[in-house]
Amino acid sequence: MNGERHYVINGDWAIDGPGTYEVAGTTVHYARDAGNHESLEAAGPTQEDLHLMVLFQESNPGIEYEFWLPREQPQPLQGDSSPLRQPQPRGIDLEPPSRPQPLPWTMSAPPTPTPKGKSQRIRHYCESDFVFRARILAKRQLGQETRYDVQVKHTYHNRSPLVHREYVWVSNACDCPQLLERREYLLMARRHVNYEHTLNRILLQRGSYARPWSPREDMLLRDIAVHCTRDRPA
């Protein structure tokens, strides 16, 4: 809607086609793909308020937004991202305890080479509690650990439910494995519950399966679950 509460793209139960629209003194590019994912891009500046209206015909899956400010202007508002729906933290503690939890390996240990090959992929898949495609939204170092804010794009295998936004933890501060923001990865992770049951979270360890997502990775995971059934003792 524009500042006068008139629909400019879609609205009043009418759906406009993708294209270029003159709105609020600027040009807006409206795109919609075959999966009904929509995007709006405008170079700006706008000359009036614009209101983004979202119609849900099912449970609200969550809304995320982001924006950039010109480099030449002061940016006092920048900081942690502020999605309308904050990620669902696993467990009670959002910050690590004052005493870091024991690590599954020492920080002085040499890097473990990442296993390769079909058999290793199957082993990681079967032993992991979570196998999913994720987009890295933000990264933050907390004490001796690294926390990733991720958007779950697709789940292949999980022993516990995953929501649209999750935190993925790495129990080191050297950022291993290295995951880049705004990139998509295929992650195979473990569920970590501490002795006091105050933490219940998704944990990536050094040597965990973490690969940039690609159609080939997706293809390699097809029918892989049957191998877990075969190897399971009767």
Image (cartoon, grey):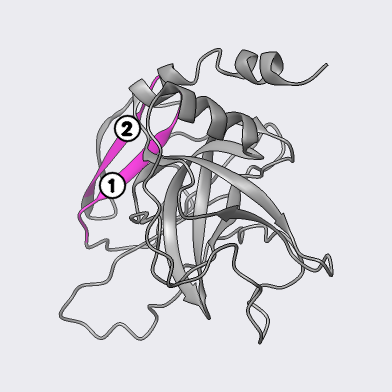
In this view, 144 is above or below 6? below
Most extreme residue toward the front is: 109
Q: Secondary structure at mark 2?
A: strand
Circle 1 crowding by C-alpha within 10 Å: few under 14, some 14–19, many from 20: few
Which stretch is magenta?
Answer: 27-44
Residue farthest toward the left in the current orientation of the protein:
72
Q: Earlier in the sequence, mark 1 or mark 2?
A: 2
Where is mark 1, residue-wise?
A: 41
The image position of residue 188, as x and y in percent, is 53, 40
Vertical order, 60 against 117 (above or below) = below
The picture places residue 156, in percent across and down from the top left corner, at 58, 28
The label shown at residue 66 is: none
Q: Nearer the viewer, residue 46 or 214?
A: 214
Residue 34 in sight: yes
Residue beneath label 2, please? 31
Circle 2 Cα neighbour tier, 10 Å, few/some/many (<14 / 14–19 / ≥20): some
Kind of residue sitting beneath label 1:
Glu
Q: Nearer the viewer, residue 81 or 199?
A: 199
| Residue 116 to residue 96: above or below | above
Residue at 47% of width from left, 23% of height from top? 119
Locate residue 43 relative to residue 136 in the image: left or right. left
Q: Please state the horizontal and vertical placement of residue 82, each as a whole percent of the image.
A: 51, 67
Q: Looking at the picture, how far across and down is residue 183, in whole percent?
A: 34, 47
- Secondary structure under tag 1 reads strand
> Residue at 74% of width from left, 40% of height from top?
160
Asked if residue 226 lies left or right of residue 116, the reply is: right
Cβ atoms under marks 1 and 2 closer than 8 Å: yes
156 and 120: which is toward the camera = 120
In this orientation, which residue lies closer to the viewer: 109 or 214? 109
Camera sees residue 12? no
Q: Is residue 39 magenta?
A: yes
Residue at image position (56%, 12%) is 223
